[in-house]
């Protein structure tokens, strides 16, 4: 599904007129074009979506500004939202690291990073991820197009539900991806202790939680 198709589904929810292209001169197209990349980036940074995970050998920098703490400083891969784990050169085990937001530091030579990319891989989006993206985009563009604050607030609530539902499904699928090992950076996101016991946390970590039903119940 293309960005234009996603934008049209968001416009249907607003509701507002459909567009042929994000580059056309209409208010709907201009508003979708202005907000699409930002909304997509926000959702991608919510967690390690399975389709957005990449693995890449890190490029060591000639200068290390934290050599008293770490043996190696590495450049952040282009388009990385955040790292999931840093591994040895074979990708066989996780190693310690620090992420400054710009650089990665580790004591591992020739390290490899597994990370979430910010690239828009529209063809790889899951149905629930697309639903979350459409709902969040609809909520973002509603007020600039319609000036209807009540409708915008309703769509914002619906977007939160869609996001939780997508994250819950991704969490369950991600467990299958990682098996018994949970990278340290995911523990807090998933509400886990260091012995993998669940702590009370966001409803999205519980597989029996139904955010859509919860939202519908709140409207009664």
Image (cartoon, rainbow, N blue to C red):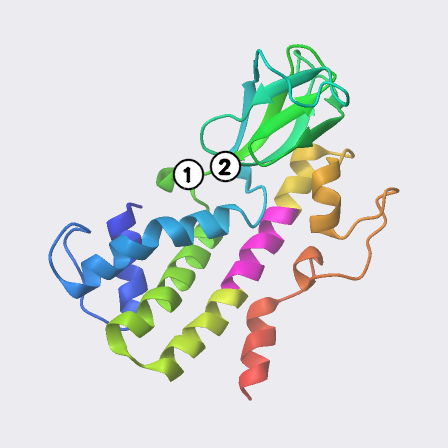
Q: Residue furthest left?
A: 25
Q: Residue 116, which numbered label?
A: none
Image coordinates of residue 200 in percent, x first then y, are: 80, 62
Q: Is residue 191 left or right of residue 47?
A: right
Question: Tag 1: Cα neighbours inside 10 Å, few (<14), some, or many (≥20)?
Answer: few
Q: Is residue 162 left or right of residue 177?
A: left
- Between the C-alphas of marks 1 and 2, the distance is 8 Å
State the quadrant of the C terminus: bottom right
Q: Which residue is mark 1?
A: 124
Q: Is residue 113 left or right of residue 183?
A: left
Image coordinates of residue 214 in percent, x first then y, are: 61, 75
Give above or below for 103 relative to 150.
Answer: above
Question: Tag 2: Cα neighbours inside 10 Å, few (<14), some, or many (≥20)?
Answer: some
Element at label 1: helix
Please report the residue visible at 65 percent of the width from the left and 47 percent of the height from the top: 172
The stretch in magenta equals: 162-171
Please report the residue visible at 75 percent of the width from the left and 61 percent of the height from the top: 201
Q: Is residue 51 visible?
A: yes
Please report the residue visible at 48 percent of the width from the left and 54 percent of the height from the top: 128
Q: Is residue 14 visible?
A: no
Element at label 2: helix
Specify the principal SS of the magenta part: helix
Q: Which residue is mark 2?
A: 52
């Amino acid at each position: 599904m293309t960005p234009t198709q996603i934008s049209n589904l968001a416009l249907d929810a607003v509701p507002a007129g459909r567009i042929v292209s994000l580059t056309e001169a209409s208010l709907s197209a201009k508003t979708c074009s202005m907000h699409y990349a930002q909304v997509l980036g926000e959702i991608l940074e919510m967690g390690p979506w399975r389709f957005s995970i990449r693995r890449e050998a890190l490029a060591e920098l000639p200068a290390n500004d934290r050599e008293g703490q770490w043996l190696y400083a590495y450049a952040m891969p282009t388009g990385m939202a955040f790292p999931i784990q840093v591994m040895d050169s074979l990708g066989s085990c996780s190693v310690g690291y620090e992420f400054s937001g710009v650089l990665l530091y580790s004591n591992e030579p020739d390290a490899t990073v597994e990370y979430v990319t910010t690239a828009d891989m529209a063809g790889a989006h899951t149905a629930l991820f697309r639903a979350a993206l459409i709902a969040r985009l609809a909520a973002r563009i509603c007020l600039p197009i319609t000036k209807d604050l009540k409708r915008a607030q309703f769509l914002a609530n619906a977007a939160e539900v869609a996001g939780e539902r997508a994250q819950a499904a991704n969490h369950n699928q991600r467990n299958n991806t990682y098996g018994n090992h949970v990278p340290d950076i995911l523990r807090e996101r998933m509400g886990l202790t260091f012995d993998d016991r669940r702590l009370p946390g966001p409803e999205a970590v519980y597989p029996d939680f139904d955010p859509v039903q919860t939202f519908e119940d709140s409207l009664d």
